[in-house]
Amino acid sequence: MKTTIGSEVLAAMRAGHPLVALETALVTHGLPKPLNLETILGMEAAVREVGAIPATIGVLSGEVIIGLSAAELTALAIAESPVKVGVRDLPLVALGKVSGGTTVSATAYLAHRYGLAVLATGGIGGVHRGACDSLDISADLTILGRTPITVISSGAKAILDLGLTLEYLETQGITVAGYGTDLFPAFYAATSPYRLALRIDSPREAAKVALARDELGLPSAILINNPVRTALEIPWQELLTYIVQIEGEVKAAGITGQDVTPQMLSRLFAVTAGRTLKANLSLLTENARLGAEIAQALCAERKRSNG
């Protein structure tokens, strides 16, 4: 499978500059055009404002690119029928000239493989509601359980079973921390009823935790959960009411499998009069910015430890 590292990312690697990996499933499947391109470019800008280099990862015409250029991002954003590329799909990329956006699982795998230590995203996948019957569990969780990378997100998608998601994260040995919070964020909601065992209040603390993980030789990710801004959140109880209502509608309509999530997100957008989208856009940019701050802190802590 052909893989290319963009010139800017390659130069940053050689110089030891801080880098932040960004996923592109949000470009191909998460946001409508042209908002998809505007958002990823805004995330890259937020990374640069802090002084780090964005390494946006995606697939163009069968080629994995670590550090898509602006022209390549534009091509991906307007691609016809792009695929959603998870870890399981990476070997299939070599068979054709497909273009697609990498999910958290694929982005984390590729980022770590090519030496990137930090990944910023919106929200991770998790254990779906009703998973006791369906066994519908995102590959994000298993990949993060065996990939030593630091991930910044705003928790798991609110439509998931957050309690079981946290249990699965613990089973996978993933260190889960709240950034400036003791509660697990629920993507659109800044808090949920679920308490976290670890709280981090600065990029330097996050860097120290990541370095301790590396010194111990632990194989799993550190998941740092950065809540959406309170002014834009949909409070947990209100959000849960919508989710239960929409879940009933989806079941009544006979919608199953991979069609459930997009349908639920679409209905959430409708019933909240677009508030979910505003929250999503805000947290994506803020997580990219925090990812850059943590990447910088990691570089600084490594220099200190190396004397």
Image (tube, rainbow, N blue to C red):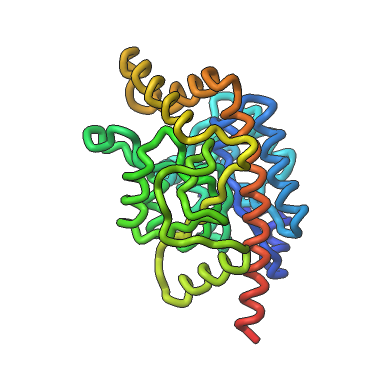
- Is 228 in front, or is 173? 228
- Number of callouts: 0
**Quadrant hosting residue 272:** top right
In this picture, residue 30 sits left or right of residue 143: right
- Provide residue 187's location: percent of width, then percent of height: 51, 39
Left or right: residue 212 compared with residue 229: left
Q: Position of residue 105 (x, y in %)?
A: 45, 47
Q: Looking at this view, is 60 or 83 the one in front?
A: 83
**Name of the residue lying farthest toward the bottom:** 307
Q: At 35% from the left edge and 38% from the top edge, which residue is drawn? A: 161
Question: Which image quarter holds the C terminus?
Answer: bottom right
Q: Does residue 35 show up?
A: yes
* Residue at 52% across, 34% down: 235
280 above or below 143?
Answer: above
Residue found at the very far left of the displayed protein = 133
Name which quarter of the figure residue 62 lies in.
top right
As displayed, is residue 226 above or below residue 97?
Answer: below
Q: Quadrant of residue 20?
A: bottom right
**Vertical position of residue 145 compared to residue 68: above or below:** below
User: Which residue shows up at 50% across the image and 61% down it?
Assistant: 199
From the top left corner, tell me how far across and down residue 109 is, in percent.
Answer: 47, 54
- Residue 279 in percent (x, y) is at 60, 34
Does residue 147 appear in the picture of this structure?
no
Give me the residue at 31% from left, 14% from top. Answer: 252
Q: Which of 238 and 35 lies nearest the eye of the viewer?
A: 238
- Name, please, the residue furthest toward the top: 253
